[in-house]
């Protein structure tokens, strides 16, 4: 799940990773079907049930989202705890584990990449190298 309306504002790593997900490769189960409902909880729930990955990376559209859009304390961290208990992972688009980030502000925003372990680890290879 990712909002492709922001493709032109994404950083190169995000564009490369989403392109990778769209490539045909039967061995890895690609291309992925891309669905974006527009609600973190609804998109996350669908991916938790059906598998997959949710991305809300930083973008270059506005300074307000230069740190990401989702709030660490009451959006990203609770979902990260749930996905960890289900065997998945949650990280930022620079590879930091969401559950290891020490908040500095109540409404602190972070980029979020969350989903099954295999998909998030593959995303990490695109975002971190």
Image (cartoon, rainbow, N blue to C red):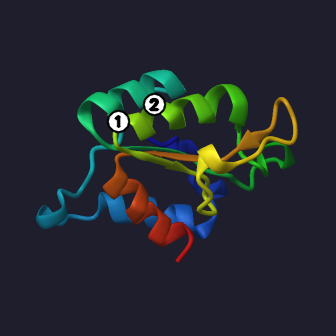
Instruction: Say few, some or many: other residues with alpha carbon within 10 Å of mark 2 (under 14 / 14 to 19 / 20 or more).
Output: some
Side (left or right) of 14 relative to 105 = left
The kind of secondary structure element at disc 1 is: loop
Kindly identify which residue carries mark 2. 82
**Is residue 43 something one can see in this rendering?**
yes
Residue 42 percent location from the top left of the image: 44, 22
Q: Are marks 2 and 1 in contact (CB under 8 Å)?
A: yes
Side (left or right) of 101 relative to 97 = right
Q: Looking at the image, which residue is at 27% across and 50% down?
A: 32
Q: Looking at the image, which residue is at 24% across and 33% down?
A: 50
The kind of secondary structure element at disc 2 is: helix
Q: Looking at the image, which residue is at 27% across and 28% down?
A: 49
Comparing 117 with 28, the one in front is 117
Comparing 100 with 44, the one in front is 100
Kindly identify which residue carries mark 1. 86
Residue 17 percent location from the top left of the image: 44, 63
- Quadrant position of the N terminus in the picture: top left
**Is residue 36 something one can see in this rendering?**
no
Between marks 2 and 1, how big is the CA–CA gap? 6 Å
Residue 18 percent location from the top left of the image: 43, 58
Q: Quadrant of residue 33?
A: top left
Comparing 40 with 90, the one in front is 90
């Amino acid at each position: 799940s990712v909002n492709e309306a922001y493709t032109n504002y994404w950083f190169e790593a995000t564009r490369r990773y989403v392109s990778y997900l769209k490539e045909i490769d039967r061995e890895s189960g690609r291309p992925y079907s891309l669905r974006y409902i527009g609600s973190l909880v609804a998109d996350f729930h669908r991916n938790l049930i059906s598998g997959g990955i949710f991305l809300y990376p930083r973008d270059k559209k506005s300074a307000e989202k230069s740190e990401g859009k989702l709030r660490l304390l009451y959006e990203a961290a609770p979902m990260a705890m749930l996905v960890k208990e289900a065997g998945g992972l949650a990280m930022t688009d620079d590879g930091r584990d969401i559950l290891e980030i020490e908040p500095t502000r109540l409404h602190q925003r972070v980029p979020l990449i969350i989903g099954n372990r295999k998909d998030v680890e593959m995303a990490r290879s695109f975002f971190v190298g």
